[in-house]
Amino acid sequence: MRARLYRSLYSIVWWCITPLALCRLWWRGRKEPGYRQHMAERLGFYPALKPTSPQTPSRSFLWVHAVSVGETRAAEPLIDALLAAYPQHTILLTHMTATGRATGKALFGTSLRVLQSYLPYDTGWMVGRFLHHFSPQLCVLMETEVWPNLIAQCARYKVPVALVNARLSERSLRRGMKFETLMRAAASGVSCVAAQTPEDAERLQQLGAKNVQVTGNIKFDVTPSEKLLQLGATLRQQIGTRPVLLCASTREGEEALILDALTAINPSDLVENLLLVIVPRHPQRFDEVANLITAHNLPMMRRSALGDASIGSECKVMLGDSMGEMFAYYAAADIAFIGGSLLPLGGQNLIEACAVGKPVLIGPSSFNFAAVTEQAIGVGAALRVADAVDMLTAAQELFRDHARRDAMAQCAANFGHLHNGAASRTVLLLAPFV
C-alpha cells in the first residue's frame, strides 16, 4: 500500500516534468536532430507494426532496453545470442537517447528481426500503451535501468522482467536507499538478475532484488568487426609510424585539462612527433572541442574532413568527430586513455580497448566500472594515473619503453579473452522466462 502511494506521487512528478522534458528534447535537437525524431514514441504512441514477411504476419517480441550508447554496444552479443537461440522471435530494442538509437541502427539496421523504438517516459499510462502495443514476452533491462512504473506495468501485463549485465556501485546503492520503499518494490518485481560481479550481486540484493546470479560482464563478449578493424588499419596508414595517444570518450572539462597539460610540456621532453587523438563521448560537443583545440594553438585535423588524405607531421591533434568508429580509433592507437575518469564522473568502459590489445591509462575516478578497472590494473593491462599531467607522463614513459608497452598490450588482450562467455550464460538464465 505504501509502495503504491509512493509510486503514485512518483507518477505525478513525471506528469509535471514531461512538458519540460519534451522542451529539453527539442532544445537538444538543435545540435542532435535525432532528439526531434520519433517524439510521439516517448509518450507511448507507436506506428502500426509491419510483418517481417508474408509468412510471419505477427511478431513475438523479446524486448531489450539499452538506454544509451554504452548499454547498446554491450547488448550486441546478447542480442546476437537471443536471435540465434530464438529464431521465431523479433528483438524489440528500446533506448532513451538519440545516440543510443543511432548506435543500435549502426549495429542492427540491416536486420529484419530487430525493431528499434524509444521507451516512453515512466508513467503507468505511457508504459501501459507501450506494452499493449508490442505485447513482449520478456523484458530485458541492461545494467541499471530499474524503473518503478515500468516494472509495475510489466507485472500487470504478466511480462517477466530480467535485469542483465547488472551493476550497482556503493554510491548508487546509497542513492537508491534514499527512496527505499519505491526502489525495493521495483527491485522485488524483477524476475531474475544477472549481475556482473559478486559485489554487484550483494548490493542488488540489499536493494531488494531476488533470484540474483553472477554471470559476468557481457561487454567482454563484444568483439570488433572486421570492417572496423580494417578501418583502423587504414587510419593507421594515414597517420604513419608516429606514436598515437588516444583519449577516448572524454567528457566536458577533461579536454581542457589534457590540452593544458600538453601545451605546458616542453616540446623537447615530448616523445617525438606525438599525435594526440581526442574522441569526445557526446557528439554535440564536437565543435566545442574543436574550438578548444584551436584556442590552444595546436594544429588540428578533424576525422570527418580526413577523407583519403594522410595526416602530416604538422598536425598535433586529431579530433575524432565520428560516430560508431571507436574500435577503429583503438585499433589505430598505441596507447588508450579512458575518459570520464579525470573528473569525478565514474569513468567509462575500458574493455573495448583491452579487446583490441591496447595498453590502458585511466584516471582516479572509475566508480562506474570499479571492479573491471581494478581487475585490469591487477593483471597489468592498465595503469592508474592521478591527473592529466600524470597521464601524459605515463604515456611518454610507455612510448619510450617498448618492451613494457608490448607487455601491457599482451596483458590487455589476455584480459579481454579471459572473461568471455557472459552472453551465453545470460541466455541460459533467461530461458525459463521465454
Image (cartoon, grey):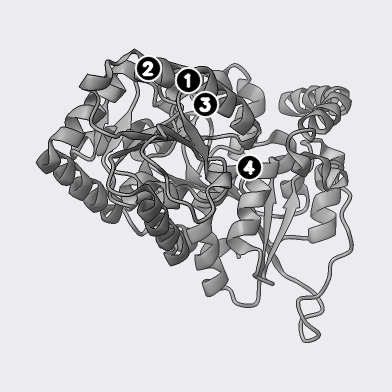
Using the rendered view, name the quadrant where residue 27 is placed.
top right
Image quadrant holding the N terminus, namely top right
Mark closer to the observer (4, 1): 1
Percent coordinates x, y for residue 311 in the rendering: 42, 45
Give 77 or 10, whichever is nearer the viewer. Answer: 77
- Give the answer, above or below, for where 11 lies relative to 214: above
Residue pointed to by mark 1: 297
Q: Confirm or deny contact between disc 2 and disc 1 (CB under 8 A).
A: yes
**Is tag 3's residue or tag 1's residue first in the polypeptide sequence?**
3
Give 196 or 419, whichever is nearer the viewer. Answer: 419
Q: Secondary structure at mark 3?
A: loop
Q: Secondary structure at mark 2?
A: helix
Q: Secondary structure at mark 1?
A: loop
Gap between marks 4 and 3 measured at Cα: 18 Å
Q: Confirm or deny contact between disc 2 and disc 3 (CB under 8 A).
A: no
Q: Secondary structure at mark 4?
A: loop
Residue 263 - label: 2
Q: Amino acid at mark 2?
A: Thr
Mark closer to the observer (2, 3): 2
Gap between marks 4 and 1 measured at Cα: 37 Å
Q: Confirm or deny contact between disc 3 and disc 1 (CB under 8 A).
A: no
Q: Residues within 10 Å of mark 2 (few under 14, many from 20)?
A: few
Instruction: Let me know if residue 298 appears in the view.
Output: yes
